Image (cartoon, rainbow, N blue to C red):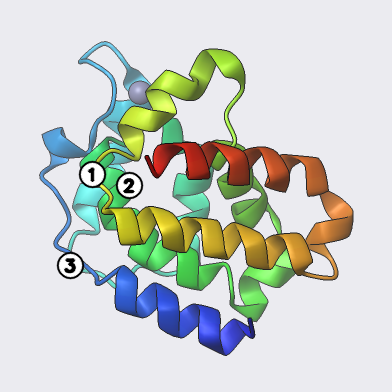
Amino acid sequence: MSPDELLAEIQATFPKIEMPSRRELRFHSDGCSQCAYLSEYLDERRNQHVDGAMIRYMHQEMCCLSSKGWAWALPHYLPFCLTPEAEYNQMETEFLIYNLGPSEEHRDEQRIRLSALTRPQIRCLALFLDWLGMHPKWSEYCPEDIERALQFVRECDT
Ligand SMILES: [Zn+2]
């Protein structure tokens, strides 16, 4: 699958949706300050274009984003991973791979974060990971992480 074909698939499967309310963006309860920072940061940029800077702010904090937050973010995050900017930075894509392939003790929580996605969206995530698994750079860099993410995402499609 070419990057253009993958992008078309992502755009067809992940239409952009309105950002959830600040409270709805939070994954953890009121005690989590990272949730508070992230939801405040995003809420302040509610009507802005979701650019590389916003994705970079989010990429290490995706565990503090609710299922509605993930459903909102992925239509921006996934296409970003196909840009030259993301190819150069690497870390946004890398963290997404890690987030999609959680360790045993984090699997239940990650399943909840992906629970607002439709089955076609889950399958599109698998396509994205498949593509990374065949990508000349990513397939060299972290093939085991991609494989773990692929297995996890496929399990979510049941
Ligand atoms: Zn949190």
Instruction: Find residue 94 and report its horizontal and vertical position in percent.
Output: 67, 50
Q: Is residue 69 left or right of residue 54?
A: left
Q: Quadrant of residue 149?
A: top right
Q: Which residue is mark 2?
A: 70
| Separation (CA) of disc 3 from disc 1 | 22 Å
* Mark 1 residue type: Ala
Q: Residues within 10 Å of mark 3 (few under 14, many from 20)?
A: few
Q: Which residue is mark 3?
A: 47
Q: What is the spatial separation of the Cα atoms under label 1 and label 2, in whole angstroms? A: 8 Å
Q: Is residue 30 above or below residue 73?
A: above
Q: Amino acid at mark 3?
A: Asn
Residue 19 seen: yes
Which mark is drawn over residue 72?
A: none
Q: Residue at x 14, y 62 (%)?
A: 18
Q: Horizontal and vertical percent for residue 134? A: 77, 67
Q: Identify the residue at horizontal 81%, vertical 47% (top origin).
A: 142
- In this view, the residue in front, 2 or 37, is 2
Badge 2 or badge 3: first in the primary sequence: 3
Of callouts 3 and 1, which one flags the residue occurring earlier in the amino acid sequence? Answer: 3
Residue at 60% from the left image edge and 46% from the top image edge: 150
From the image, state whether disc 1 or disc 2 is nearer to you.
1
Query: For residue 116, which numbered disc appears in the image?
Result: 1
Position of the N terminus by quadrant: bottom right
Q: x and y percent of residue 156 in the render? A: 41, 38
Q: In this view of the protein, which residue sits in the foreground, 59 or 33?
A: 59
